[in-house]
Image (spheres, rainbow, N blue to C red):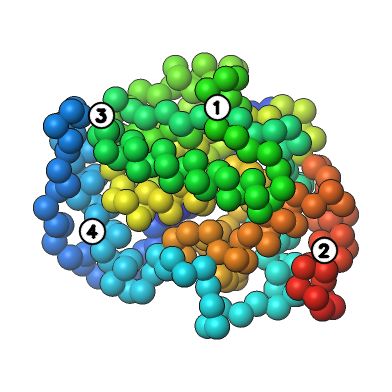
Amino acid sequence: MRGSGGLRGGLFAAGLLALAACDPVQTGGVDLPPPPPLPEVGADATALAPASRELAAYYQRVQNDLLARGLLRRDGGGADTPFTERQLVENFVRIALYEEFSTVGGRIVARESESRLHRWEQPVRMTIEFGDSVPAEQRIRDRNAILSYARRLSDVSGHPIRATDANPNYHVLILNEAERKAIGPRLLEIVPGLGQSAIDTVQDIPRTTFCLVFAVDPQNDGAYTRAVAIIRGEHPDLLRLSCIHEEIAQGMGLSNDSPAARPTIFNDDEEFALLTRHDELLLQILYDDRLRPGMTVNEARPIVETIVSELLGGPV
């Protein structure tokens, strides 16, 4: 989850629904710098509404602050971010076999809990939808970024992912504020029977939650059959791209964040903006044929240790 928890801040389940989100790191009481001029809106696009203009200024300030502190790195990690075989095993267990969110009293709350292994067994058919007020220039950038990233995820994981509007099962929605607040009926079209708590979670997220994704496991057996990622259109380019990277990958089954993991996008410290080599290894492990959906931590751990040993060439 990107931000203070991402709304994938976890994954939530509608049958089982998994939710993940991204929330921003805290600024420690330090004032953010004055907002820069608002970005130009394309002549062929609807002007941003006041609420979205205010959010765009806020998120630009957040991005500026993160960059000023050396965060939102795009280098994928390097000599300053080594990790061992044992660390990779533990990071995988925490990120793939725990969840950020739980349902308590009919409400989705940020509460980590041990889960089971989740991933897709059927091919992913991904489609991209934009809110009416998202400028045309931004749509082009975002579509190209998502399609390129989907190809990368497919290559890394070995799982088929293709872009199509024919019977899609993974929806990526780029929405501005007013569109997100009115997205309930569309969510019900995408996921019939989706609970009101899930809809409320999407429509009522605070601005400290940057983006979110939820995935559906209808048989409660660990196999996802549908996912929806919600990306705020008001984000500046890098922050929006970081949401795209984290939420789409979380919707593939890496549903938790870990403060101990590094270098990774699955850590709410926002150090890394884009998928790292460490994260590619997590996806390779998740989609290894020796693992299967529904595995518990105890069932998966010895197999993960073997896979990691093979990937990194040493004992764990």
Contact flag, marks 2 and 3 (Cβ < 8 Å):
no
Disc ID at residue 133 = 3
Give yes or no for contact between labels 4 and 2 (Cβ–Cβ under 8 Å).
no
Sequence-wise, the earlier of marks 2 and 3 is 3
Please give the residue where the numbered disc 4 appears in the rendered image.
61
Asked if residue 284 lies left or right of residue 305, the reply is: left
- Specify few, some or many for label 4: CA neighbours under 10 Å numbering under 14, 14-19, or 20 or more: some
Q: Position of residue 231 (x, y in %)?
A: 41, 40
Residue 168 picture location, percent across and down: 58, 25
For the residue marked with disc 4, what is the amino acid?
Arg
Cα separation, mark 2 vs mark 3, equals: 46 Å
Q: Are marks 4 and 1 in contact (CB under 8 Å)?
A: no
Residue placed most toward the observer, 9 or 72:
72
Sort mark 3 into few (<14), some (14-19) or many (20+) by Cα contacts within 10 Å.
some
Quadrant that contains the C terminus:
bottom right
Q: Which residue is mark 2?
A: 307
Q: Which residue is mark 1?
A: 164
Image position of 122 with respect to 211: above or below: above
Residue 153, numbered circle: none
